[in-house]
Image (spheres, rainbow, N blue to C red):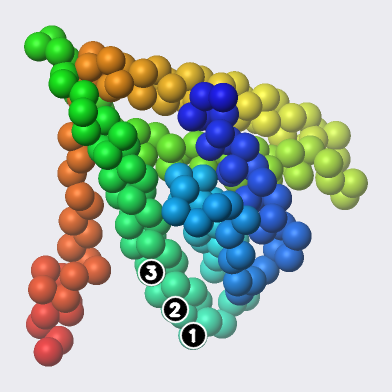
């Protein structure tokens, strides 16, 4: 099984698990073995699933402004958690490839493997929800046809992205490409770099 096949399997299972309750406050019980990359992937996808639905909730035109602000703060925390989890996945890959010596002609990729995997997790959510749209009994035929066409594109996109991820990992393992990870420096979350925060002291 390729890494992308493994990841897609974990992501699909995690999205399905979330929708058993379909509640952003449901505690996550990770079904994967602790300490494995699968467990990290599942935790990452759960964060994405909760945030997806928080983004839906906050767009309610009748939402109470106080509740909306609380949800916005929660989304901010979720974004930081998501970034931290992506960096954890990249750490896993750096350890896996620690013994690889890049070839003299090795090139760098535009993004690290984990950020590509991040997009794969989001795709699992897009596919779930677009498929859900194709099964609505309260929507007209035009809506269903549009959503079926979009679903087909999303499924094709997942094949392409999965292939690209597996090729990237093969290239890094063979020394044809090399990893270079830049930690995300989110200045707005840091009270020492966000002027609104450090000027409010």
Q: Are marks 1 and 3 in contact (CB under 8 Å)?
A: no
**In-front residue for pair 163/156:** 163
Relative image position of residue 191 (x, y in whole percent): 16, 76
Placement of 47 over or under 115, stated as above or below: below
The residue identified by callout 1 is 66
Q: Are marks 1 and 2 in contact (CB under 8 Å)?
A: yes
Relative image position of residue 171 (x, y in whole percent): 31, 17
Q: Quadrant of the C terminus?
A: bottom left
Q: Nearer the viewer, mark 1 or mark 3?
A: 3
Q: Residue at x 47, y 48 (%)?
A: 36
Lower position in the chain sequence, tag 1 or tag 3? 1
- Disc 1 element: helix
- Disc 3 element: helix
The residue identified by callout 2 is 69
Query: Can residue 3 be seen at all in this image of the molecule?
Result: yes
The residue identified by callout 3 is 77
- What is the CA distance from the residue labelled 3 to the residue labelled 2? 13 Å
Placement of 56 over or under 107, stated as above or below: below
- Binning the other alpha carbons within 10 Å of mark 1 as few (below 14), some (14 to 19) or many (20 upward) gives few
Q: Is residue 81 left or right of residue 142?
A: left
Q: Residue at x 33, y 43 (%)?
A: 92
Q: Quadrant of the N terminus?
A: top right
Q: Is residue 132 left or right of residue 6?
A: right
Q: Are marks 3 and 2 in contact (CB under 8 Å)?
A: no
| Displayed quadrant of residue 79 | bottom left
């Amino acid at each position: 099984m390729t890494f992308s096949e493994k990841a897609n399997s974990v992501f699909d299972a995690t999205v399905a698990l979330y929708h058993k309750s379909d509640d952003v406050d449901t505690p996550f019980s990770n079904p994967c073995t602790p300490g494995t990359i699968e467990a990290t992937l599942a935790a990452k996808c759960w964060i994405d699933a909760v945030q997806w639905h928080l983004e839906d909730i906050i767009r309610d035109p009748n939402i109470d402004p106080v509740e909306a602000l609380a949800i916005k703060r929660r989304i901010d925390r979720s974004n930081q958690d998501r970034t931290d989890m992506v960096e954890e996945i990249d750490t896993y890959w750096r350890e896996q490839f620690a013994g690889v010596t890049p070839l003299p002609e090795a090139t760098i990729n535009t993004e690290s493997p984990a950020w590509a995997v991040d997009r794969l997790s989001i795709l699992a959510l897009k596919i779930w929800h677009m498929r859900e749209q194709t099964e609505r009994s309260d929507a007209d035929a035009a809506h269903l046809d549009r959503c079926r066409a979009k679903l087909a594109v999303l499924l094709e996109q997942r094949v392409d992205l999965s292939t690209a991820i597996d090729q990237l990992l093969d290239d890094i393992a063979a020394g044809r490409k090399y990893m270079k990870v830049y930690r995300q420096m989110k200045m707005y979350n840091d009270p020492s770099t966000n002027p609104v925060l450090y000027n409010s002291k």
